[in-house]
Image (cartoon, helix red, strand yellow):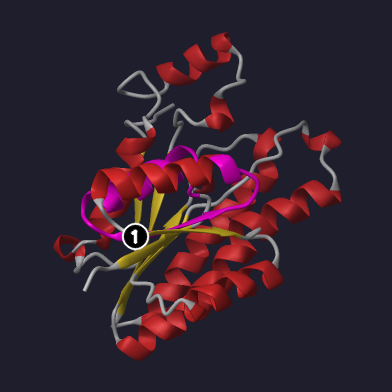
Amino acid sequence: MARTVLITGASRGIGASTAEVFASHQYNIIINYNHSEMEATELSKMLTEKYQIKTYTMKADISNQSEIDNMLKEIKKQNIQVDVLVNNAGIDRDSLLEDKTFEDFEITLRTNLIGPFWLSKKIGMEMLERKHGKIINVTSTNAIDTYYPCSADYDASKAGLVSLTHNLAVQFAPYINVNAVAPGWTNTDMVKEIDKEYRKEEEKKILLHRFAEPKEIANVIYFLATEDARYINNEVIRVDGGWYL
């Protein structure tokens, strides 16, 4: 029986690359998206044709509990069993600290932390009944030691996701592996608009002197879902090219 992975924020960037890596290993894919319907539809078509697997596109704003619940109802209605959950959806609202609003901080927390909590709880309990499953959270090195005051809300949300990873690993032991991947700078839409000189300065802090490609993050996410990683649990794996100060 083919396994199924649910990837949030799967229409672009790391999420889309992760979907393709899993599809290349014959996973069926649930492509969650919020605004990027066209990209999600195109990705679904490409994966289905290229890898001969099943794909499901499901719209849900991960910051909204009722939309998450509706997506889970649709998954259940279609009799889909989620074997792997990848909490990848995330947003940032970078701005000077003095310009940040309550609403900026709140929506960032709801998307990057509270949504993953709710999904992990609901799907994790089903995995627990089956005594099998993998949950992989996409956090950030910003959660650990690469702090940027303009990203205070993003950094806090990703640090919370690290803590959530540890608590879920304890809660779901010994049947479910819960781990996190912490990317550093990665070539996604989030970095397209950054100043070229600033980028050069940031690249100097990386031992490999470049930003990651999304697939390089996706490969690590996939590895954590494999049986080869069955003894890796409660870990946060940095994928940052060797960032240093």
- For label 1, the residue is 54
In the depicted structure, whether residue 164 falls above or below residue 142 = below
Image x and y of residue 32, in percent: 52, 56
**Left or right of 124 in this view: 118:** right
Camera sees residue 220: no
Based on the picture, tell me whether residue 23 belongs to the magenta stretch.
Answer: yes
Based on the picture, tell me whether residue 109 belongs to the magenta stretch.
Answer: no
Q: Nearer the viewer, residue 228 or 62?
A: 62
Residue drawn at x 53%, y 40% is 39
Category of crowding for the residue at label 1, using alpha-carbon neighbours closer than 10 angstroms: few (below 14), some (14–19), many (at least 20)? some
Report which quarter residue 53 is drawn in.
Answer: bottom left
The quarter of the image holding the N terminus is bottom left
The quarter of the image holding the C terminus is top left
Give the residue at the far bottom of this rendering.
129
Image x and y of residue 208, in percent: 30, 22
In the depicted structure, whether residue 212 falls above or below residue 103 = above
Report which quarter residue 148 is drawn in.
Answer: top right
Residue drawn at x 58%, y 49% is 90
SS for tag 1?
loop
Give the residue at the far top of this rendering.
197
Image x and y of residue 21, in percent: 28, 46
Camera sees residue 28: yes
Q: Looking at numbered disc 1 in the image, what kind of residue is underneath it?
A: Lys
Span of residues in magenta: 10-38
